[in-house]
Amino acid sequence: MNFLAASIESLGAKVVGWFTVGYGMFAFLAQAGLLLLEPATWNRATFDVVVKQIYFTAVQILHVFLGYALVISWLFITIILSTARDFGLTEFASEMTIRVLVLELLPFLTALFVALRSGSAINTEVALMRVNNELDALAHCKVPPMQFEFLPRLIGGVVSVVTLAGLAGLLALLMGYLAIYGMNLAGFEAYTRTIAKIFDFRIMAGLIAKCALFGLAVTVIPVTAGLETPKKLFMVPVSVLRGMMRVFFAIVAIEVVSLALKYI
Amino acid sequence: MSAVAELPDDVARVSLDLPLRANLSALDNIALIPLYQRHYGAADSARLAHAMLEQLGHAAIALLRDSDMTPAQRFIAKLARALILKRPRLVIDRPGAMLYDVPYPAFIRQLAAQAEMTGSWEIFDFRWNQALYQE
């Protein structure tokens, strides 16, 4: 009986914990959204920090990211093409390449890439800022941490994921063309027609929304996880661990929902 | 030290509990105030911050980050940040905890003479350190 009561109690505590975390995240997002609508937010100082964040999140890693996208795209295109040839489905190869790579795999990998590189850094930094009282010091100086520290990271994350996924997608389209038709313009019309057929307004809007949600997930979750950290230095790794697990589940959930909406 | 916790909002504090932003230089930590509170441009804010450090006689620490500063340099950066807030009262909270590498009453006296600021400076310290200020 005691065991049952303890299990129910533990389950209840977990559910309450999830709701508290979810509420905290949405409350933070709502606060950030309201602040975005305020004209006072858009001052030169915030704009400068946003530019810096985009540089650190997207521009600084561009060459590494494009190299990684190139290798992944080349591998997948080769696998899809050889499989399509084996089954006599060569005419569907370009559509399959675009759907698998550009719409699903590359945005997902981009989100993981940014989460591992920038999300973990954001989580650690915010947790350390909280533990070291840096947020209290900013509040004492009346420098709003939301405008100075958090909002630029959110905007930077969204812009970076959307842009990097877009660039990787363009690269994959180019690679796909070269792999299927080679270095000539013979298949240009057919290939562009396939692209136009796939990328209607609904798909484009869905792709951009998905990438934007990925961008929010890899920034909002680490920031809120960092802010939840108790003021004890040894809790920083625990905060990063929790934050990154939540980021992973959020990315997978967004991808699953997007696939379900598209194909079911 | 409960008196420090009860201080009103219009008091600028220099305290161990109010650290510098770790990933910013001393200059950037100070320049944040005019940038966000008075909506100055980045260049003007940096100029003001630099002038404040020069006034305290420590312009050389401008580009140092928290981890690269000595305790005295860190104190100067915190003091400059507090001074640029332009609040009527400035409270230095337990200076011994921040300035353990210099004889601090003399050091603070020297800084106060250099700074020539309006407003009052107050030091909140433990009673047993009172003798240190009576030289």
Image (spheres, grey):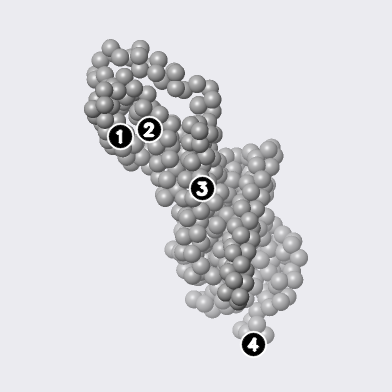
Q: Are marks 4 and 3 on the same chain?
A: no
Cα–Cα span, label 4 and label 3? 55 Å
Instruction: Check disc 2 and report the residue beneath it.
Output: A101
Whether residue A232 is visible, yes or no, is yes
| SS state under label 4 | helix
At a point 67% along the width and 85% down the height, the residue shown is B127
Cα–Cα span, label 1 and label 3? 25 Å
Whether residue A157 is visible, yes or no, is no
Q: Nearer the viewer, residue B79 or A218?
A: A218
Chain letter behind tag 4: B
Q: How far from the left and from the top, in percent, is residue A6?
A: 60, 72
| SS state under label 2 | helix
Cα–Cα span, label 1 and label 4? 73 Å
Residue A76 bears which disc, if any? Answer: 1
Q: Earlier in the sequence, mark 1 or mark 2?
A: 1
In terms of image quadrants, where is residue A108?
top left
Cα–Cα span, label 2 and label 3? 20 Å
Q: Locate the N terminus of chain B and report the quarter of the image it occupies.
A: bottom right
Instruction: Check disc 4 and report the residue beneath it.
Output: B128
Residue A257 bears which disc, if any? Answer: none
Cα–Cα span, label 1 and label 2? 8 Å
